[in-house]
Image (tube, rainbow, N blue to C red):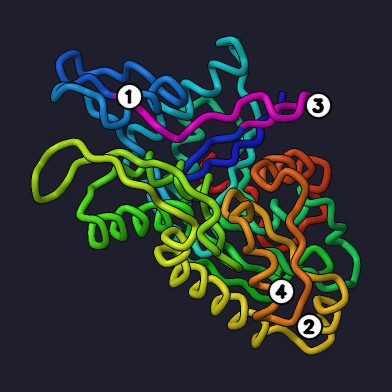
Amino acid sequence: MDIGIDLGTANVLIVMGNKGIVLDEPSVVAFNKKINDVIAVGSDAYKMIGRTPDHITVVRPLSDGVISDHKMTERMITAFIEKVTGKQLFMPNIIMCIPSSITDVESRAVVEAAKIAGARQVYLIEEPVAAIMGAGVDISAPDGNMVVDIGGGTTDIAVISLNGVVAKLSLKMAGEKFDRAIVKYTSSRYRVLIGEKTAENAKIAAANVYTPDGSRKLIVKGRHLVRGLPERIELNDYDIYESLIDGVREIIDGVKSVLENTPPELAGDIYKNGIYLTGGGALLFGLDKLMSSELGVECHIADDPLSCVARGTRLAFKNIDKLLDGFEHVSMYN
């Protein structure tokens, strides 16, 4: 009954035992201030975003890959664990995924949330390590492999060889920043304010960060900033390109920075093996081709990139004694 949790800024994925992924829901909590209690988590709470009265607050308890609301995170993790275990009275071992640049204070908050949720033993694994394992790469070999995990709150970049992390970097540029960039673009270009949920749908439907030509289009609805009335506008892939390209360039520059700090032998391995793209951001249309042309290294989108970290978490239970860097048994908090 061991449980692995990919505690993402946008989504929480849980793997349990040999069952694989048993839960995949948004990292959202709805709180009723009148009764001082949580009324919904996950998908049910996500439907309420932007549609609640004053006494109900819908929050994302994780921001930029770390816990920003400790109490809501505890309630969310507890609710999700009860959902997948059927409220059985047992204390599982839990592996929690964390960004590679997380601080001691932030990691302690993650551990405490897991302990309050009922964990017997808590392990922490860095997201890029879990991601590349979930992509099917054998990290125990003396062979350099590079992963770029673009999640909701952070982009984690790492070079891994012999079960160890050789070079790494974590950026606060990821899915949520992309959504906000689209909101900012439509506000300044069309004077129409749209919600982040609408921006996310536009990103998924019309993004093309390599060769935009105006062919991918969609209608979005929002509020006109001057007239204050409901408005609908048509966005195309060039609009989305203009809003996202600066953030994408920041990620590419981060990859270049990590490659500059990579030993030459491992850099040669990466040229041979390519770069693995995981996380929801890997699905941005044209991102793999843009990175390949900019870096001169072939980029591969992993199979089902959204669940790579969760799959790697499940594999980590089988390799607890072999993993070196990026994996920790947090006995100090037991």
Q: Earlier in the sequence, mark 2 or mark 3?
A: 3
Q: Amino acid at mark 1?
A: Met
The magenta span reads 14-30
Q: Is residue 68 left or right of residue 298?
A: left
Q: Which-is-in-front pick, marks 4 and 2?
A: 4
Q: Are marks 1 and 4 in contact (CB under 8 Å)?
A: no
Q: Earlier in the sequence, mark 1 or mark 4?
A: 1
Specify few, some or many for label 4: CA neighbours under 10 Å numbering under 14, 14-19, or 20 or more: some
Q: Earlier in the sequence, mark 4 or mark 2?
A: 2
Q: Earlier in the sequence, mark 1 or mark 3?
A: 3
Instruction: Determine the image quadrant of residue 53.
Output: top left
Q: Amino acid at mark 3?
A: Asn
- Point out residue 312 in the picture as x, y percentages from the top left corner: 74, 46
Number of the label disc, if any, that sits on residue 267: 2
The CA span between labels 4 and 3 is 36 Å
Q: Is residue 294 magenta?
A: no
- The vertical placement of 197 against 250, above or below, is above
- The vertical placement of 285 against 270, above or below, is above
The CA span between labels 1 and 2 is 47 Å
- Point out residue 174 in the picture as x, y percentages from the top left corner: 48, 58
Q: Is residue 28 magenta?
A: yes
Q: Secondary structure at mark 1?
A: loop
Q: Which quadrant of the rendered structure holds the C terminus?
A: top right
Number of the label disc, if any, that sits on residue 48: 1
Q: Is residue 322 left or right of residue 59?
A: right
Q: Secondary structure at mark 4?
A: helix
The CA span between labels 2 and 3 is 36 Å
Q: Secondary structure at mark 3?
A: loop
Specify few, some or many for label 3: CA neighbours under 10 Å numbering under 14, 14-19, or 20 or more: few
The CA span between labels 4 and 2 is 15 Å
Q: Which-is-in-front pick, marks 1 and 4?
A: 4
- Residue under label 3, please give it: 18
